[in-house]
Amino acid sequence: MKLRLTSPSDLIDLGTIKDLSGIKLSGNAVEIGAMTRHAEVAASPEVKKAIPSLAAMAALIGDRQVRHMGTIGGSLANSDPAADYPAAVLALNATVTTNRRKIEADKYFKGLYETALEPGELITAVAFQIPKRGAYMKFRNPASRFALVGVYVADFGSGNVRVGITGAGASAFRQSEMEKALSSKFAPEAVASIKVKPDGLNNDLHASPEYRAHLITIMAKRAVEQALK
Ligand SMILES: Cc1cc2nc3c(=O)[nH]c(=O)nc-3n(C[C@H](O)[C@H](O)[C@H](O)COP(=O)(O)OP(=O)(O)OC[C@H]3O[C@@H](n4cnc5c(N)ncnc54)[C@H](O)[C@@H]3O)c2cc1C
């Protein structure tokens, strides 16, 4: 609304609906209610224990004010191309639960500010699979702190590695070449020499497609180094 992208005639505040908020362990996943604030995820002992990389990622979102107001449901419904959670949703093979259905990570992001959500559909929770290890590295836009490029690497063991990228394209995407390389050998050198093609990557006053392509490799390498620590 502040950016004048929309001017709704009516507003419904979801903020006081308690059932939409909270964090719980559910089988091999961590389930986070849609109205849970980024600061709650960053500070949650459950998230820190089960998926420390997810808590660390939430701690990198915006600034203190943004983290105390912004919600995971709002972030994913908005689907800003430079938001951090989308990379985690893809890398941690999350399931987005709505008032109507469950949406798999790979079917959720559709394009620039576009998701699989239909008009009137409400996200109620997001369940992230718990990996063996993982890490998120982002190169921040120094002004907004959004991701110029953010790379989330998650190793689920038995050669199952997922890599989610945000900031680089119209919406978050997985990087299959890196996933294949890391599935054979989970080590920084497995991705260090991968040259990402700049075709189709974002081009704006902050960074060219070539620079973003370069950052994907650098951030992926750093994420693997961090995950191995
Ligand atoms: C200065 C600034 C810096 C920021 N930096 C970052 C950053 O570094 N990284 C990052 O990831 N994000 C960043 N953000 C975004 C922030 O994290 C918020 O998540 C984002 O602005 C959405 O706000 P919100 O969660 O309050 O949702 P709202 O603004 O309330 O909602 C956003 C949209 O989603 C819809 N919506 C909200 N909840 C639901 C739901 N449960 N189901 C369906 N639709 C829903 C709303 O109707 C609206 O259309 C930044 C924001 C600002 C203002």
Image: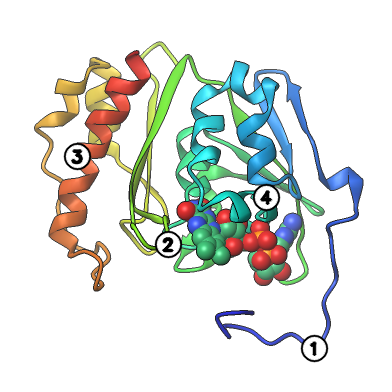
Q: CA distance from mark 3 to mark 2?
A: 22 Å
Mark 1 and mark 2 lie on one chain; the one further toward the N terminus is 1
Q: Nearer the viewer, residue 89 or 12?
A: 12
- Residue at mark 3: 217
Image height of 100 relative to 12, above or below: above
* Disc 4 residue type (three-letter): His
Q: Position of residue 56 (x, y in %)?
A: 50, 31
Residue linked to disc 4: 68
**Does residue 229 show up?**
yes
Foreground mark, 1 or 2, reads 2
Q: Residues within 10 Å of mark 2 (few under 14, many from 20)?
A: few
Mark 2 beta carbon near ligand 1 (under 8 Å): yes
Q: CA distance from mark 4 to mark 3?
A: 31 Å
Packing grade of label 4 (10 A; few <14, some 14-19, many >=20) is: some
Q: Is residue 47 left or right of residue 98?
A: left
Question: In this rendering, would 32 be left or right of 141?
Answer: right
| Image coords of residue 97 (percent x, y) | 73, 45
Give the Cα separation between the discs numbered 4 and 2: 16 Å
Q: Which mark, residue 144?
A: 2
- The reply to whether callout 1 and callout 2 are in contact (CB within 8 Å) is no
Residue 145 badge: none
User: Which circle's residue, 3 or 2, is located before the other in the chain?
Assistant: 2
